[in-house]
Amino acid sequence: MQKSQTAVRTFLENFRKRAGSILHHGDRIWQLLTVGMGLGVALLLLGIGWMLWQDSADARTVFGWSFLLPTADASWNPVLEHFEAWPFIYGTLITSAVALLMAVPISIGIGIFLAELCPGWLRLPLGWMLELLASIPSVVFGLWGIFVFLPEVVEPLGSFLGAYLGGLPLLGALFAGPIPASGASRLAASLILTIMIVPTISAVTRDVFLAIPRSQREAAFALGATEWETISQILVPYGLSGILGAVILGLGRALGETMAVTMVIGNSISSAVSLLKPGYTMSSIIANEFAEAVSPLHSQALIEIGFLLFFVTLLVNMAARFMVWQVARKTPQEGRG
Amino acid sequence: MNASSGSTHFIRARRGYAGRRIVNAAMLVFTGLTTMLALVPLFWIIGYVVYQGGRHINLAFFTQLPTPPGVEGGGVWNAIQGTILLVILSGIFAIPPGVLAAFYAAYYPNTPLGIVVRFSTDVLAGVPSIVIGLFLYALVVVAQGHFSGLAGGIALAILMLPTIIRTTEEMLKLVPPTLREASLALGAPEWKTSLQVVLPAAGNGLITGFLLGLARASGETAPLLFTALGNEWFDFASLVRSGVETGLNPFEVFIRIIEQPVDSLPLTLWKYAQQPYPERIQQAWAAALVLMGFVLAINIAARLWIVVRARRMKG
């Protein structure tokens, strides 16, 4: 009895000591955990890429490069199991390009207004409103798009563009009408994308301007520049790589955006180039067909599109980050008081 | 000639002073106008969703399971429960790793791994959500052999991760270094300092980060299309009851629940918006109102909190 009690006591004491020493030197474990989780984020990216690459192996060997190449009569036929992705690649490229074209001037204007011109008390609320716009779920954009935006904005605008620009020599092909009565078209997708990427580009642009040291502005003013001359000839060139980064970041958003685009683009596989025609993007074909893809080759083809989307957005985002970091790096730690 | 003429080789002003001032005013007005322009869709969307959703929302919407298409009545109780389940799961999967990674990013920002962590966090934030859905399909759904809430929860966790890491990192940097140094100087090991001194000091900030991540994840649809898939009969209560009746322990019941396909509000909205039945479209508007209200409320609360907190830390 006595003996067993002391045995238990010494065991407990030993245990407490060992546990204490492990916990006291638990920094090893802590470092392992933090380093592990940090590495985990990087490995996650590699894992996503690797998995999609693996799972599209058959589609890649069967269709080769012709899967991606621009052809006028690309076929996407689940019955005959022949897949070529050009219509979707084109849809993604044209909608993103048009969205950027419209979003960039607006966003840079907003960035300049928020960082340089707007009164202090208004800066925070305006910034928040843009963030709210960015945080509205994509499906809500889509729902609003179907029932309000398509009939009230896109259809009239599309008819107008078709009537006045459809006859132009080169650009005409882009505006060949008529737009479908529902308004669902690539133009609608581009406009919705514009609304969705403006907050991203303008927020980063604003931050870039805010990072530019005050001395740059003071020097320009001292030389007699007006406010706009300071902005356009001093600040914009100074922060150019950051602004370009913001634009590229917006491009990344536009390339990958799925739900709102799927709901308004009309989802039809066509070889027409016109903005006023319904189309498809890479992300929306995956959203629409993946859950119903029956044959292995069909889902592999969709995964290959997914891999392409991943790869492109990865490159785009890396480029954007490098450019935004460039501004921060060359700026001395002076800031604006 | 005005005073600036001596600098024309630097400031490329080819017009006279009046011209320059007109250009200046015009461009300043233009930037203000673009800002107004960007806010038009914000108010248009919020206003219209509140108007339509408010008209069609009722108690049944929150408490009943869906009726068959074309039949009046019914609600989205399944989707509400599914959203809650997905949010809880994604929190479990995203918060601990996110916070640990943020500790590394905050305290070793200029080591090679620290740069890698911050860089990959930013890049991960830009990966299209549908691609993350494909990844989880290949990783979990194929392995399990069926769609599940588990796969959906992990997909949302990956979407949340960058937000959690970035905001946690910012909050950890706001904690005065003296606090940490004091704890280390008293002989507390680093892990204890981090968990018991730094983390509580940054605690509220962490909650904001989680809330922002949650707001983003709870509005996402694309990654759920082929992971959680949707389930019109999903009901916690009946799942628990049938689990208990077959004599499973609580853990097994939980596993059984997360192995079901689940619905979520955005998924429901997406499906209903494309159906030809007016009742379903009305419910889609109501779902949009609930979803948007939830997301906007969390966003506003989290941002207010960040501002208040940053002010307090500074002062």
Image (cartoon, helix red, strand yellow):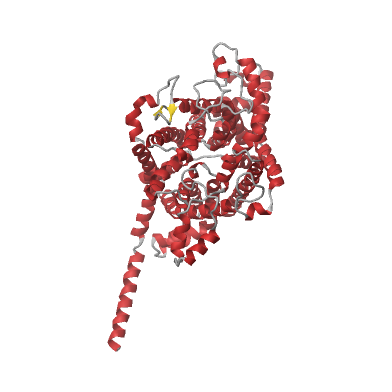
Quadrant into which the N terminus of chain B falls: top right
In this rendering, the answer to whether A128 lies above or below A26 is above
* Camera-nearest residue between A186 and A209: A186
Residue at the spot 55% in from the left edge and 61% down from the top edge: B237
Locate residue A5 relative to residue B201 in the image: left or right. Answer: left
Locate residue A23 relative to residue A175 in the image: left or right. Answer: left
Q: Residue furthest bottom?
A: A1
In this rendering, the answer to whether B12 lies above or below A57 is above
Residue at the spot 40% in from the left edge and 60% down from the top edge: B191
Quadrant into which the C terminus of chain B falls: bottom right
Work out whether residue B276 can be spotted. Answer: yes
Residue at the spot 56% in from the left edge and 11% down from the top edge: A169
Locate residue B256 relative to residue A152 in the image: left or right. Answer: left
Locate residue A46 relative to residue A122 in the image: left or right. Answer: left
* Camera-nearest residue between B207 and B235: B235
* Residue B79 locus on image (x, y percent): 57, 51
Residue A306, located in which quarter of the rendered image?
top left
Work out whether residue A135 can be spotted. Answer: no
* Residue A244 locus on image (x, y percent): 50, 29
